[in-house]
Amino acid sequence: MKKPNQATTRKSSPAANNVRPGGSADTAFAQSALGRKLMATLSDPATSSANCAVAEQLLRNPVRATAWGIEELAAHAHTSAATLSRFARTLGYSGFAAMRDDMAQVLQGMLQPVEKLRDVMLQPNSKSVATTQSLESGLNNARTTAHNLDTAALADISERLGHARVVYIMGFGVSSHLAAMLALDLQPFCQHVVNVVEFGGTEVAAGRLMNIQSKDLLLAISFPRYAQDAIQLASYAKDRGAYVVALTDSMASPLVPMANSTLLAAATHPVISSSSVSAVLVIEALVTSLMVSKKEYLQQAGRLTEAISNYLYTPSNGRKKR
């Protein structure tokens, strides 16, 4: 059986094998149209060593490359400005500047948190300003999310959670913590809960989803900066017939087209890439909706409390013995 999103293997040049984008910006750029052109350039045995060096520099340092001038990039790639200009034209650009502008466009969403931080740092009393703005944005996000939350959709999703054969919860990066919280809260009330990205990275996550089917539900969580892996694996789950629920920040999120239902949590923040305040609010609302949907769930909650009562603090067991 083919693993989800398993890439087709082909022979590539040593230079291409050496490129392993490490950060989220590097990975996203490598998967863009320009990034794929650069990877193809590295994989082509006919590519000159100079062009390979340029392509490798751009793939390894996409963010810094958007700030470099043509002479700076030429120095890093140990080549000439003329070679860079020719290289850009072979990729279909009018010149180096046009290629660099395209790179900046691809990376714009990931660079926004850095730009926001720079703007705040330029203000007088930047520390207190940033703290105040952070608190205010969190409160505003919570109010907006609570006001716009579709309770009918929430009830429908909680009903599906209760009937699903397996409930898969998926979140990468910061969203992995939200996924862990949701998985822990759902575990007593669902037949089987799997935290897809609990450990092991993308390859292990893909393996956990290999047997997902039409009787299962995937709740995928992704906020800016969106994880490409979440989009691809959600698409795989949908193709397998599973019911996909997206918890994200906007209907413009790339996760939405993969979802059968969407829960929105406002996530704007003056400094960091996204806020998790509203996501926690939605998670708690979803779990609450599930718990009150059946009397047996309330009974299960009582049994759970009894089972862990010895581990809970009370004045009697918390008092030190003399």
Image (spheres, rainbow, N blue to C red):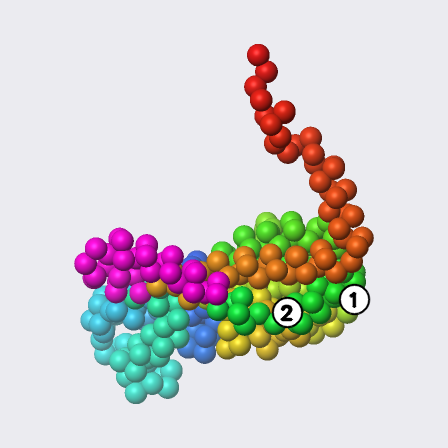
Left or right: residue 170 compared with residue 223: right
Q: Residue at x 36, y 58 (%)?
A: 134
Could you tell me which quadrant the N terminus lies in?
Answer: bottom right
Q: Mark 1 sits on what residue?
A: 215
C-alpha distance separating marks 1 and 2: 23 Å
Q: Residue at x 57, y 70 (%)?
A: 149
Return the x and y of residue 239 as percentages of the image width and height.
70, 74
Left or right: residue 62 compared with residue 193: left
Q: Residue at x 48, y 58 (%)?
A: 277
Furthest residue in direction top, as rendered: 322
Return the x and y of residue 116 as percentages of the image width and height.
31, 65
Query: Does dot 2 land on a helix, a strand or a loop?
Result: helix
Q: Are marks 1 and 2 in contact (CB under 8 Å)?
A: no
Q: Is residue 221 above or below residue 36?
A: above
Q: Mark 2 sits on what residue?
A: 151
Q: Is residue 214 visible in the rendered structure shown here?
A: yes
Could you tell me which quadrant the C terminus lies in?
Answer: top right
Q: Which residues are magenta?
A: 116-143
Which is more toward the observer, 277 or 200? Answer: 277
Furthest residue in direction front, as rendered: 315
Left or right: residue 206 compared with residue 307: left
Which is more toward the observer, 172 or 201? Answer: 172
Left or right: residue 22 compared with residue 302: left
Image quadrant of residue 206? bottom right
Query: Which is nearer the N-term, disc 1 or disc 2?
Result: 2
**Amino acid at circle 1:** Lys
**Amino acid at circle 2:** Thr
Residue 159 inside the magenta-drawn segment: no
Query: Does dot 1 land on a helix, a strand or a loop?
Result: loop
Return the x and y of residue 302 as percentages of the image width and height.
75, 44
